[in-house]
Amino acid sequence: MTVLEVRRTERLTPHMIRVVAGGDELSSFPDTPYTDRYVKIIFPRAGVVYPEPFEMDSIREQLPREQWPVTRTYTVRAFDQAAGELTIDVVQHGDAGVAGPWAAGARPGDVVRLLGPGGAYAPDPEADWHLMVGDESALPAVGAACERIPAGVPVLAVLEVADEAEQQELRSPGDLRVTWLHRTAGIPDQLATAVRELTFPSGRVHAFVHGEAGAVRSVRTHLVNEREVAREQLSVSGYWRRGRDEDGWREDKAAERALAAS
């Protein structure tokens, strides 16, 4: 576990909040090469008295499951080891959920407990071009990846957000071209449709497709079956599933893995 303190926050868009944390323990935080590097933020439950020192193993041994802290997974948008700062961007959906209200109310000095990091993807510097597809939940990883693209290399990004106000400025040494989609009720598979309409550059692509599980599956099916992109050229992950919180999505994934193994 890494224990930090909030240093500052910034509202990037009406629903995206940046939390910058720091502290002495960042000196031992692994600086991995992955641009989809993620951490699990630990949120103690209100009204529960936790044993000291605050350690997950002790908590799980001493308290019933319903009193265990809640964890939420977030991509590390940036890690500045020299400055001792770690940046996480959080989507806020009003007062619903756990992480959004926390980010909205975070103040300098607040404690932030993290597990991780994990991660598996970074843009292949040998690829001829790159494809980035996702929604708000993937924006931090997409932003970090775009900054790692070699100079002049084409990058096509197809990104779905709620509306124009949620668009962010993305920067890249590469030749970045972004298609922003605004979420509209009644338009299914908007991301996959937009990807189908793209004219792909020539050469070998390295694709990053992350976000809502159903949309990710549709885009992956198109890339593999219609564009004949090899699976080793894809980084694909469903970060969440519509109608499910992270705990429910974990249960769904566990059930799907068990079914596949049976």
Image (cartoon, grey):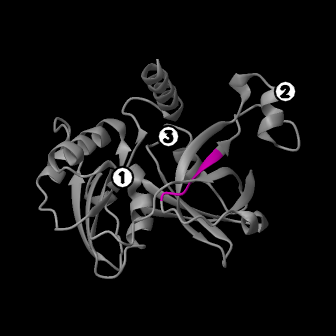
Residue that lies at the very extreme toward the right in this rendered image? 52
Q: Which residue is mark 3?
A: 95
Q: Looking at the image, is mark 2 or mark 3 earlier in the sequence?
A: 2
Q: The magenta stretch spans which residues?
A: 36-41
Q: Which residue is mark 2?
A: 62
Q: Looking at the image, is mark 3 or mark 1 earlier in the sequence?
A: 3
Residue 255 appears in the picture as rendered: yes
Kindly identify the amino acid type of the residue bearing the numbered disc 3: Asp
Circle 3: element type: loop
Which residue corresponds to the image point at 55% horizontal and 45% vertical from the top-left? 73
Q: Marks 3/1: CA distance?
A: 40 Å
The one of 96 and 237 positioned closer to us in this rendering: 237
Q: Is the residue marked by circle 2 packed among few (<14), some (14-19), or many (20+) residues within 10 Å? A: few
Q: State yes or no: residue 181 in magenta.
A: no
Q: In the rendering, at what x and y percent does residue 87 appear?
A: 57, 64
The one of 238 and 241 positioned closer to us in this rendering: 238
Q: Which mark is residue 169?
A: none
Q: In the rendering, at what x and y percent does residue 143 appear?
A: 40, 65
